[in-house]
Amino acid sequence: SGATAETAPSGPAAVVPTAQGPASQGQKSELPVAKPTSEQLARWKVAAFDPLVLLAYRDHPETGFVSFIAATNDAKQYLLGGTRLTLWDISREEPVHEFIGPQTEDDKRLLCFAVSPVADWCAVGDAGGILRTFDIAGRKELVSRETDTHDIVGLAISPDGKEIATIPFVSEITVWNADTLEKKGTIDVDAREVKHLEYIGPNVLIAAGETMSTWDTASGKKLKTYPSGKYQTAVALAPNRQELVFGAAESLQRWNLTEDVACGEYRGVPYRNPLIRFTSDEKLVAVVTGEKIRILDATTGQILQVIDAAGSTVTDASWIPRTHLLLVGTDTGRIRIWGRPDEGKVFGLTPLQTPIAVTRHDSGEPAVVAENLALVDVRSLPRLPDAKPQSDSFSSDSYAAPVGREEAAAFFRYILEERGWQVVADQVTPYTVPYRRDGYLLNLSLYGEKPTETLISLSCLGNYDLRKTPRLDDSLKEVVYEGDTSVIYKVSASLLQIETQLLSKLHQAGWTAVVRLGRSQNEQLDTRDFEFVRNGTVLRVNVQRDREKEGLFVVSYGLSLTLHSLPVPPDAGLMEWDDYLESRMVANTSMSLQEATAFYESAMVKHGWTLRESGRHIEQKVVYLPYFWGQRDVTIALEEMADGRIRILAGKYAKDSWQNPEEPDASADGPEAESGKDDGIEAADVPILHAVGSPTYTAEKSMIEFEIEKVPLLDVSKAYSEAMMERGWTVKPFGEPLHDSISLHFEKGSKIVYFQSSIDPRGIGSVHLSGNGLRWTKDIASQQLISYSAWLRNHKFPATLKRLDEYQRQMEKH
């Protein structure tokens, strides 16, 4: 789906040379911004566009999985296919007819579908190799035929409606008479894995797979091969049948069919297998992936709007003919209709959600995601012509443009000031120009000395001023730098004191510490990396030893905006969380179930979400609150645990969480637990032999690692073999022992501990112990100073800050 990232990568808080960064102090702009010429204004002109809004949300319980959706030619109805085939009126919330009932058997699943371009009928193929046609207006089946194949995975109807082409999981295309479904012939395509069929004219069929080529369906001969990417399905024909769009090396290639030449590109969009959908007037094109819908100006390729999806994967989309209304289907069977309010009125549709107002103009509290998006979505800001995008998210964009820095600066001054942004004149640097609007900061960076190329980076950093973030004032020794997007200071305190005080202070200030779901933590003895979330902002904190002054630590703050965050009760303090494609969350609160329900019913609305009744479920000990916002879905689950606390769950979390969502705190009475008949060995009891320094214990990876003295590896392995045999383990060599690498397996019953000793090219020896034979129920504080989150993981404690004192007492013994 193309490489995009919605948040900055986790890790140390980077010190970015921003408007107030150290590199900018005392510098003035060296970029003269000339008034744009008439020629430039003509090239920069952006077509007027009113963003599409959500007009309808269909969540019928019997819809089932939706793999394709298509508007009918009369622009009054649409068809849904997946586990069934149904007909819907655009203005109604329930289907008006069912052509095919629920198909639960694997060989009955509907796999492909098409509506005839010239008549009121459709064709559908299923996993059992059956091809059927239906009269849409007459609401009846026309013809059904067994094709003697399995899995009809591709289907296309010719522009004159006279023939149908199908393909199974092989490269042989079959052509059928559309009226009778009698076989007309076959085409043996000279490319493996044909994934998509598309007619571009009567008897002219595109087959896209390993390669993309056109074939004469009458003679079976190949006509042309196009310069497309391999194994892709991104193929679309414009309604006027004069232009073809397909996935190429780094973009969507536009091809003039009349002149048979390339005629442009759509850049900055996914080019590996997206769906491409033109409006019937050819003014807009939707480029659709499971997580995003990008609306482009079909002439210029400018991205006009990005609709983010989460919670439900987008499976298909279809423009309603002669309108700019877009039908969107998802794997969960939820259907949405997007468009402009004036067109929606024709069908009795009105906007379901009002854009949230931007109210946090001061920088004391970070704005929520909806406020950030309401102010600016960087992805939909105009780009310079012929730009070569490198990456983009809703808050940042980077690309190369074939102009000099001066022209690039003039372009952005023109574009941004037109949208209400103003240059912060006294903070401009030679390469960075900050803009502000309503308390928000937008940084423009321009790099390059050539008059024909400039590297451009545009970042929205929100409304929060990092200087308002609490610091460790009691141990503060020096403020290295402070700005609204970066703060660096030095403290005199132990790493344990710094960690516990930061967690406590930032929690009191409204920040929730997060541990990334499904991501291992590689900790270093003298370093800590933290992340905190508050509304739509992620605060990154890095702590490391000062290289200049012994006994000091350097604390750095940095920030980024997130597209996926949800409200968190004030007492949560710490939670498991991820925001890669959606908000995934496992948190805990001391609120009662009723209080937590009331909190979310209020907070979610303030964050822009709308509660939907379908799926809402309230019982004595569990509550499910389903919400939608635009193309996003989320259900907040609240479960009362055995000890009375409430666990909060959202998104796909279970496999990645250290907290068992179905069980109460199994270790509530202490760190040690009964091992029962487990014949493994506690990680805390594993002998540490010939070690240099303290070992590293990583419970989530079930691994112990440490460096060793300059001792022959054979001696190290012999010492370990003897120590483990004394504890009842059997030793088995694995592979031939080498001078720089020895592997052993220690076995006891069904348990295994893997031993790997090696010497790296620098001459440093190390030992790695891992496997299901390691147990992690005993306290390992005496072996290693670990972070608070790692301590919680090791003991399977709930995510909370309430054990911070207990953690500190145990770590102080180290």
Image (cartoon, grey):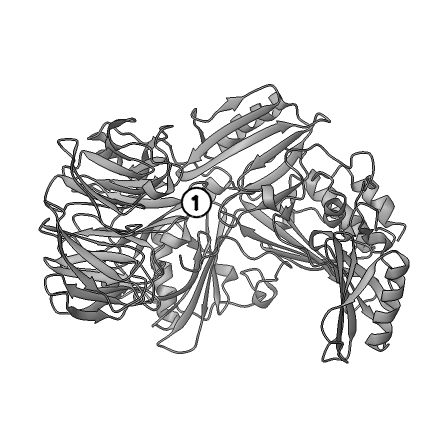
The residue lying furthest to the front in this view is 148
Give the quadrant of residue 566.
Answer: top right
Is residue 593 shown above or below 390?
above
425 sits left or right of 488 in the view: left
Residue 538 at what x, y percent from top left?
58, 49
Query: In front: 610, or 17?
Result: 610
Point out the image quarter for the N terminus. bottom left
| Front position in the image: 260 or 153 | 153
In the rendered image, the vertical position of residue 62 relative to residue 726, given as above or below: above
Q: Which residue is mark 1?
A: 373
Report the side of 562 relative to 356 (left or right).
right
Where residue 196 appears, as percent x and y from the top left, is: 27, 57
For label 1, the SS is: helix
Q: Residues within 10 Å of mark 1 (few under 14, many from 20)?
A: some
Amino acid type at image mark 1: Leu
Residue name at image x 87 percent, y 56 percent: 728
The reply, left or right, for residue 126 in relation to residue 766 is left
Q: How many marks?
A: 1
Seen in the picture, residue 470 relative to 263 is either above or below; the reply is above
| Residue 712 in sight | yes
Does any portion of residue 38 appear in the rendered image? Answer: no
Pick whichever, 325 or 246, lies toward us. 246
The residue sitting at 78% across, 76% down in the picture is 764
Q: x, y percentage for residue 782?
A: 88, 52
Residue drawn at 82 percent across, 41 percent down: 671
Q: Position of residue 215 (x, y in %)?
A: 16, 65
Residue 657 versus residue 29 in the image, above or below: above
Work out whether residue 128 or residue 357 is closer to the camera in this orientation and state it: 128
